[in-house]
Image (cartoon, rainbow, N blue to C red):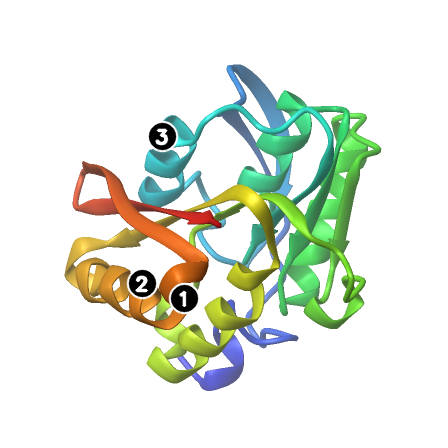
Amino acid sequence: MTGNDHYFTANPASADERRTLTVHLAGRDVEVETAGGVFSPDHVDLGTGVLLRTVPAVPGSGDVLDLGSGWGPVALSMALESPGARVWAVDVNERALDLVRRNAERLGLDNVRAVLPDDVPADLAFAAIWSNPPIRVGKDSLHALLLTWLPRLAPGAEAHLVVGKNLGADSLQRWIAEQLGDAAHVERIASAKGFRVLRVTSR
């Protein structure tokens, strides 16, 4: 695999290979489109499944964020559960963002905005952040990503992150707590199938 094939690049070199899947999101079976060159193109990956079974209800209004959206299982779940919220699906992979837009249209969801990171208005504060973050981008890039977005939680709002135990979930929990200090409370709220779910509550 070359660097350009990775799902966390803007334009993956691997073949598009569009396909249609039936997946279970927000308590119902839905049909979605996926493609090569995006994260977990053949199913809802295990970590995302753990996250979606753990998170609380989506806020009924306001702006909510799926950070590292891929083809959209988290963003689509948020939008299906809370049509009154505005869901921001953020990714650097243009193919993934196109899939989120197509899937939102397929499901009749007009509350999803699939955008590049720089296209999110700088003054937005989020009522919730859900993420299966791209751990494999490397520690420095991951840390920069989290320090960009976690401070944008509204006061009292929560972020939920799912991270593999063997990919450093416990050390990441400690690092987030050290970096955010008194601005947030960080805790592990679930552990399943080799994954940890971390909750970051803004103060």
Distance from the alpha carbon under mark 3 to that under mark 1: 23 Å
Q: Amino acid at mark 1?
A: Leu
Name the residue tied to disc 2. Answer: 177
Distance from the alpha carbon under mark 1 to that under mark 2: 5 Å
The label number, if any, that marks residue 54 in the structure image: 3
Query: In the rendered structure, are the residues bearing label 2 and label 3 in contact, judged by CB atoms less than 8 Å apart?
Result: no
User: In the picture shown, does residue 143 fall above or below 24?
Assistant: below
Nearer the camera: disc 2 or disc 3: 2
Residue at (19, 36) in percent of width and height: 192
Q: Callout 2: few (<14), some (14-19), or many (20+) C-alpha neighbours within 10 Å?
A: some
Name the residue tied to disc 1. Answer: 180
Q: Is residue 105 left or right of residue 96?
A: right
SS at circle 3: helix
Quarter of the view holding residue 103: top right
SS at circle 1: helix
Question: Which residue lies most toward the right here?
Answer: 110
For the residue pair 60 and 75, the one nearer the viewer reads as 60
Query: In the rendered structure, are the residues bearing label 1 and label 2 in contact, judged by CB atoms less than 8 Å apart?
Result: yes
Q: Amino acid at mark 2?
A: Ala
Residue at (18, 59) in percent of width and height: 170
Label located before the other in sequence (3 or 1)? 3
